[in-house]
Amino acid sequence: MKPGEKFIDAAFTRRMHRNRYRSIWISDLHLGTSGCQAERLLEFLQATESDTLYLVGDIIDGWQLKRRWYWNQTHNNVVQAVLKKAKRGTQVFFVPGNHDEAVRQYIGLDLGGIRIRDEMVHVTAAGKRMLVLHGDRFDGVIACAKWLAYLGDNLYTLVLKFNQVYNAWRARAGLPYWSLSQYLKHKVKNAVSYIASFEKALAAEARSQGLDGVICGHIHKAEIRDIDGITYCNDGDWVESLTALVEDHDGALRIVTWQEVVVVKDRLRAEEESMAGVPA
Ligand SMILES: [Mn+2]
């Protein structure tokens, strides 16, 4: 036995255990758009294992594909990676969202080992019953102002400047003062309250179905929190946040990021190699 071999095994075991889960939920991949971070998604899929994988809607972006075809080898590889998981024994469920609503006509079918289902109930290892759905059904008016929630301070300053110039022009034209910043602030407040009301609506739905919690996507905001005794979980997305929701073997739910799964794995591999005397 070479010196350090035991440690190599330890590191290997640690790595394998770190990324093995009972369940994984991902959504809002938006494959078929340039926004999809397919490389990172592929790395995540290859670095993780689970008994069950849920694809919680907006997997393939049919809306975008109708307008402009964006599909490359990495997008293919992502699809292949999911099919491979299904082939190797992972139960894969696909709960369609609004961007892939065309798939809703196939609900109930199993295609290539992928089970296409409507809203479903997942029971955790701890016995908690969770509603699994995309979440678009709870869209009220929304969306139009979502990007405004990301308005930063710098942009705000710019807006105030623009506001001054614009109102100077309005004054010369004999028009009344109109506050752009007030208008935008109002929109931002709406965006923030949209997220809050989305979360509340989903928690209320879980409660009305007599369940313990809800797992959804759609608003691209990863979150786990208690809402009046209901566990609200959102798995985020693979356009901006690069997150998944995972269930450990004891039933604990948490959000993991691409960084912690893939970057940690790469670091451990480098450790292994340096311990084995192989230049990293
Ligand atoms: Mn959606």
Image (spheres, rainbow, N blue to C red):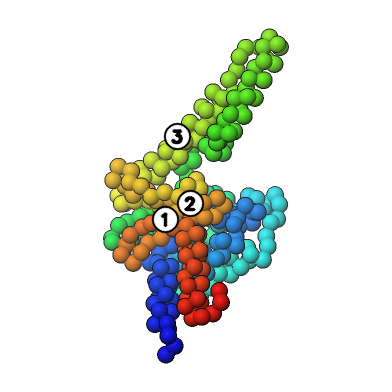
How many dots with numbers?
3
The foreground one among 59 and 278 is 278
Q: Tell me if I can see residue 126 in this picture.
A: yes
N-terminal of the pair, mark 1 or mark 2, is: 2
Q: Residue at x 52, y 37 (%)?
A: 149
Does dot 1 land on a helix, a strand or a loop?
Answer: strand
In the picture of the structure, the residue carrying the numbered disc 3 is: 193
What is the three-letter code of the residue carrying label 3? Ser
Q: How far apart are the two marked residues, 2 and 3, measured between alpha carbons?
A: 18 Å
> Which x, y percent locates residue 248?
36, 64
Q: Residue at x 58, y 20 (%)?
A: 179
Does dot 2 land on a helix, a strand or a loop?
Answer: loop
Number of the front mark, 3 or 1: 1
> Which x, y percent locates residue 120?
41, 57
Does dot 3 land on a helix, a strand or a loop?
Answer: helix
In the picture of the structure, the residue carrying the numbered disc 2 is: 236
> Which x, y percent locates residue 254?
38, 56
The C terminus, quarter of image: bottom right
In the picture of the structure, the residue carrying the numbered disc 1 is: 255
What is the three-letter code of the residue carrying label 1? Ile
> Which x, y percent locates residue 221?
47, 47
